[in-house]
């Protein structure tokens, strides 16, 4: 089958399912078909030849809209591709559309998008998780095999868990952030959704590595991540921090994650106890550091150089205030104000400095734990996908959705969510492995061996084809 | 927390309804993050960013050679209001 014919099918399925799922903010027919026709005219020698990819709408794509799910950037079109997108394009991939997200990647349910909530294909009355919900759904609904998302505190792993797909968060510095619209620069990374570990590995091999345009991207060799997927995992040590399996985990999630521990044991892994004594402070540290950095990063949206500007204003300051008031949504304003507060005169030491110190303790815990094990296993999310509207009036309850994911972002280590079962209501559950710095190949190896031995064998109600 | 004051610092013109919404929510979140005070961090070196040891070791300087920039036309093309090669804004004073 030609790339053109296949791409037409993908676009048609994306278009057909979008009214039910609302996961694409734009579907790029013209550019995709043009690229597909071109690929059919050249030898199929590039690593991602003709593969369809969906990209979260906070990652810049030249000539396409990059809205960040925000009214303030509703009509923004980037002049350049993010490095990750540029590398995918060069490898022969086709960006078929941009996906819905919580505004500026701030949220855990996708309900904070200015362009409507994304629906979970397993049950459309439930959230897909967030903030990369649209990309998670693009993969879960079978439209694409892989998609780019972004992580600041769990925004790839948590929706991957709630949608039943693989979600990879990489080591800080593994993938260039150039072209990823900044939320919290010391925590942000581009992440990958895959229908399988292999799909995610193929994308990572193409997009990882040093980029002169992001000074925080590290000069660390990039292996072929697909080449080690089948490695033996027998004898590997998986650490389980039992103290974190306390209150707040739904019984079905607990059962499925316990089963995943048994399954890893059956695959020959050794299960060991580890402790992460400061992990319970992760959410508190995160909501100081992430909001502080966000308040600074989002200062650039002022109605001058790009994006939305409020109408009928007569003075500069009035224009700034009204533009930001009207352009940003409720959660974004809440976080900008929290960040402004924790950085404000008289409070900086009590909040921001304190959080940076506890962040150091969280990282130290991981370094110590990885002397005893190769990966640390916890649930990805304490719950399955929750009902749309269930947590919108209680921001703190929403923040606690990320209790198992934020610590990896604070420490800078990679993590992966692997589908490990269904709840009694038929909703997917993810088990999470967090690895040492630069251990993406090992994490993908664990995931591949696991999903091969214990496949999910279920599909969401809404599925392509 | 005086939400009105914080909003002003953040350049947000918030409404009375928003003050009523945010005041209790932000108080609750601030109270939650204050649990960090139970930790003694006197001798802890703060973690200032996200860089790994390998990231710290990465050479990020380059030769100081001029490169082509975005250009005026492209730089202004997304502006809500641009006139004669400039961003246009309401009166400053």
Image (tube, coloured by chain):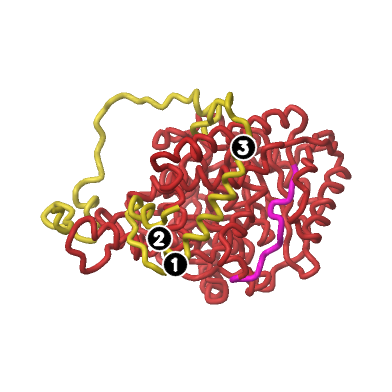
Chain colours: A red, B yellow
Q: Which residues are magenta?
A: A377-389
The residue under the point 40% across, 43% down is A344
Q: Position of residue A96 (x, y in %)?
A: 48, 61
Q: Which residue is mark 1?
A: A114
Is residue A188 shown to the viewer in this render?
Answer: no
Q: Which residue is mark 2?
A: A67
Q: Chain of mark 3?
A: A
Q: Are marks 2 and 1 in contact (CB under 8 Å)?
A: yes
- Asked whether the residues under marks 2 and 1 belong to the same chain, the reply is yes
Indicate whether A250 appears above or below B75: below
Mark 2 or mark 1, which is nearer to you?
Answer: 1
Mark closest to the chain's N terminus, 2 or 3? 2
Q: Position of residue A152 (x, y in %)?
A: 54, 47
Is residue A13 shown to the viewer in this render?
Answer: yes
Q: Position of residue A86 (x, y in %)?
A: 43, 47
Q: Which residue is mark 3?
A: A413
The residue under the point 45% across, 63% down is A330
The alpha-carbon separation of the residues under discs 2 and 1 comes to 9 Å
Q: Main secondary structure of the magenta part?
A: loop
The alpha-carbon separation of the residues under discs 2 and 3 comes to 29 Å
Describe residue A49's horizontal placement relative to residue A374 as left or right: left
The alpha-carbon separation of the residues under discs 3 and 1 comes to 31 Å
């Amino acid at each position: 089958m030609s790339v053109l014919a296949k791409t037409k099918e993908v676009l048609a399925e994306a278009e057909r399912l979008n009214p039910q799922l609302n996961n694409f903010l734009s579907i790029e027919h013209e550019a995709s078909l043009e690229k597909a026709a071109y690929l059919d005219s050249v030898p199929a020698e590039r690593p991602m030849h003709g593969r369809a990819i969906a990209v979260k709408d906070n990652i810049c794509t030249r000539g396409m809209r990059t809205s960040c799910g925000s009214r303030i950037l509703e009509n923004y079109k980037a002049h350049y591709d993010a490095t990750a997108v540029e590398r995918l394009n060069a490898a022969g991939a086709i960006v078929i559309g941009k996906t819905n997200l919580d505004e500026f990647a701030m949220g855990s349910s996708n309900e904070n998008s200015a362009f409507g909530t994304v629906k979970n294909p397993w049950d459309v009355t439930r959230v897909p998780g967030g903030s990369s919900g649209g990309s998670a759904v693009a993969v879960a609904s079978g439209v694409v095999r892989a998609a780019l998302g972004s992580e600041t505190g769990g925004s790839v792993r948590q929706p991957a868990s709630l949608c039943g797909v693989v979600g990879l968060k990489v080591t800080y510095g593994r993938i260039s952030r150039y072209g990823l619209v900044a939320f919290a620069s010391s925590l942000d990374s581009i992440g990958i959704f895959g229908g399988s570990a292999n799909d995610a590995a193929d994308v990572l091999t193409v997009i990882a590595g040093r980029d002169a345009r992001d000074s925080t991207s590290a000069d660390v060799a990039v292996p072929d991540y697909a080449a080690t997927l089948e490695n033996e995992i027998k004898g590997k040590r998986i650490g389980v921090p039992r103290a974190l399996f306390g209150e707040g985990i739904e019984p079905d999630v607990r059962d499925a994650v316990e089963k995943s521990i048994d399954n890893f044991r059956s695959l020959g892994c050794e299960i060991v106890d580890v402790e992460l004594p400061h992990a319970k402070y992760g959410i508190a540290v995160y909501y100081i550091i992430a909001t502080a950095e966000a308040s600074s990063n989002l200062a650039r949206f002022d109605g001058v150089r790009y994006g939305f500007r409020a109408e009928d204003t007569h003075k500069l300051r009035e224009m700034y205030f009204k533009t930001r008031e009207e352009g940003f949504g409720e959660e974004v304003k809440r976080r900008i104000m929290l960040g402004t507060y924790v950085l404000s005169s008289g409070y900086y030491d009590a909040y921001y400095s304190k959080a940076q110190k506890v962040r150091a303790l969280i990282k130290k815990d991981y370094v110590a734990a990885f002397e005893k094990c190769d990966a640390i296993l916890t649930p990805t999310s304490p719950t399955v996908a929750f009902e749309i509207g269930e947590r919108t009036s209680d921001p703190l309850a929403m923040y606690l959705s990320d209790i198992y994911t934020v610590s990896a972002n604070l420490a800078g280590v990679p993590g992966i969510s692997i589908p490990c079962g269904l709840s009694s209501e038929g909703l997917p559950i993810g088990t999470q492995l967090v690895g040492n710095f630069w251990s993406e190949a090992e994490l993908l190896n664990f995931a591949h061996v696991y999903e091969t031995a214990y496949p999910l064998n279920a599909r969401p109600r809404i599925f392509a084809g | 927390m005086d939400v009105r004051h914080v909003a002003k610092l953040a350049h947000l013109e918030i409404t009375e309804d928003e003050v009523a919404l945010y005041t209790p929510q932000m108080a609750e979140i601030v109270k939650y993050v204050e649990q960090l005070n139970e930790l003694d961090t006197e001798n802890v070196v703060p973690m200032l960013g996200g860089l790994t040891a390998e990231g710290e070791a990465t050479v990020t300087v380059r030769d100081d050679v001029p490169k082509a920039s975005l250009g005026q036309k492209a730089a202004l093309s997304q502006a809500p209001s641009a006139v004669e090669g400039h961003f246009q804004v309401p009166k400053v004073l």
